[in-house]
Image (cartoon, rainbow, N blue to C red):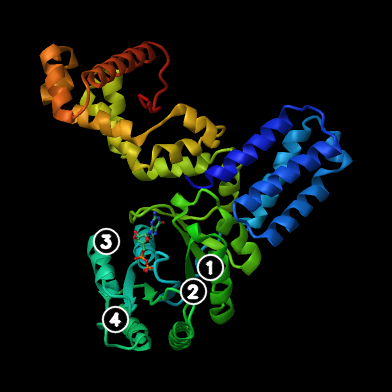
Amino acid sequence: MIFSSLAEKLQDTFDKLRGKGKLSESDVKSALKEVKMALLEADVNYKVVKRFINKIEERAVGKEVMDSLTPAQQVIKIVNEEMQALMGGSQEEINISPDPPTIIMMVGLQGSGKTTSAGKLARMLSNKGKNPLLVAADVYRPAAIRQLQVLGERLDLPVFSMGEDSDPVDIARGSINFASTHNCDTIILDTAGRLHIDQEMMEELEGIKGAVDPDEILLVVDAMTGQDAVNVAQNFDQRLDIDGILLTKMDGDARGGAALSIKEITGKPIKFAGTGEKLADLEPFHPDRMASRILGMGDVLGLIEKAEKSIDKEKAKALEEKIRKNEFTLEDFMEQMSQVRNMGPMDELLGMIPGMGGAKQLKNLQVDDKQLDHIEAIISSMTPEERRKPDIINGSRRKRIAQGSGCKIQDVNRLLKQFRQTKKMMKQLNSGNMKKGGMNLPF
Ligand code: GDP
C-alpha cells in the first residue's frame, strides 16, 4: 500500500506523543528524531529531510505549542502542514492551451510506465469531455506502437502513428495536422525512453520540443525507484524544463521517498499518481490528502470520489429499495461486493478511512482480497434459486456448492451465517431509523 511502512512508523511516534499530555522540549525533539529516521528509512533525500525537520522544529519547539491545551495535536498539525508543503501545497493541473490543440509531451525512461500512463491520461481527459489523440512517437521500443494502438482501441480513441521507420519529430509534427482534421483538442505524445539517461534520447526529445512547442512536458517516473526517480527527474528537468511529474506505481511504493522529495529537489510539482495497472488507475495528485493519509488522518474526500466513480447510482437506488422491502438476496450481496471492489483493493480503501491509515490496525483486521474472492466463488456456485432463497440450501446443497467453488463446507456455512446476520441487521434498520437516501454496505 502507498506509504504504508512510513505511515506506520510516523503514527507510532505520534501515538506516543499523544499519550504524554503535556510536552517538554525534549519530548518534541525526540519525536522529531524518530520522524527524521522514518523519513530517511523511507528513502527521502537527506537534504530534504534536514530542511523539513528544521522547519518543524522551529515552529513546534516554542511556548505557543508547548503551553497549548493539545500540544501533541499542534505538533502533528505542523508536521501535516509542512508535509503538504513539501509535496507542493495544492493540487496542480496540467497546462491547457487556450488555442487548441493542447500538446502534452510524455517523457521518461523505458519501463517507467509512460505508454500506460498516456492511455490513462487520455481516458481521464476523455471522461472530462476532451477529445484526445494518442501519438505513437516511440519508434525504438519493440511493440510500443502496437501497445498504444491496443490502448486506443480499448478506449475507443484515435491513435496516430507513422510506423517504426519515421522520425519522431516528423511524427509529432504530423500529429498536429491529424488532430485538426479529426477534431482532436488534445494531443498526447508518447515519446521514446531508454533504460538510462542518454544523450541521444535527450537530443531527440529536445528536437520534438523545439518542433511542436508542447504546452505541457509531463515526466513519467517510477515511484518504486526512490531516489533514482529524483535523480532522473533532475536530469530531465535540466534538459527539457519539464512542467510536471506523473509518478507511477505508487500502489507498490510502501516507502514514499520519491513522492516526498521530488518537488523540493526539482521545484516541479507531481501532477498525477499512477496507482495500478488498470486504465482507471490514475489520480490527480493532492498533496494535502496524501499528507493526511501518511499521518493516519485518512482521505475522506478521496474515498468519496472513488465511490462516486465506481458505484452505479441507479443500482444503489434499486438496492436501497430492496433493503427497504426486505428483499435483499445473495445476488445483491455479490453485486454490491463487486461494486465496492471496483473501487480498489480493500487495504487501500481502509487506509483512506480516518484512523485506519496505520498498517498495524489493518493487519489486525486482516482484510484479505482473497477472502472476497472466496465469497464470490461460493455465490457463483449457487443456483439462481439458491441465491434468492438461501433457506433452501440444505446439507447436500452445501456440499455441492463447496465443491463447485473449491472452498470448504465451513466457508459456505460462514457465508450463509454472515448473510443471515446482514439481513437481520437490515431488518432492524428498516424498522428503526434508516435514513432516506443513505446507503448501507453489508460488510
Ligand atoms: P514504458 O516503457 O515507460 O512505456 O512503460 P509501460 O507503459 O509499458 O509500463 C511498464 C510496466 O509498468 C507495465 O507492466 C505497466 O502495466 C506497469 N505500470 C505502469 N503504471 C503502473 C502503475 O501505476 N502501477 C503498477 N502497479 N504498474 C504500472
Residue shown at 21% from the left, 31% from the top:
377
Position of 435 relative to 255 (above/below): above
C-beta proximity under 8 Å, tags 2 and 3: no
Q: Which numbered disc flags the more N-terminal residue, 2 or 3?
A: 3
Label annotation for residue 217? 2
Nearer-the-camera pick, 197 or 377 = 197
Q: Which residue is mark 1?
A: 244
Considering the numbered disc 1 on the image, is that residue within a helix, a strand or a loop?
A: strand
Nearer-the-camera pick, 140 or 289 = 140
Nearer-the-camera pick, 46 or 88 = 46
Q: Amino acid at mark 4?
A: Phe
Quadrant that contains the C terminus = top left
Q: Residues within 10 Å of mark 1 (few under 14, many from 20)?
A: many
Considering the numbered disc 3 on the image, is that residue within a helix, a strand or a loop?
A: helix
Residues at marks 4 and 3, CA–CA distance in whole angstroms: 18 Å
Q: Position of residue 46 (x, y in %)?
A: 68, 59
Res. 369 image quadrant: top left
Q: Which residue is mark 4?
A: 178
Q: Which numbered disc flags the more N-terminal residue, 1 or 4?
A: 4
Q: Which numbered disc flags the more N-terminal residue, 4 or 2?
A: 4
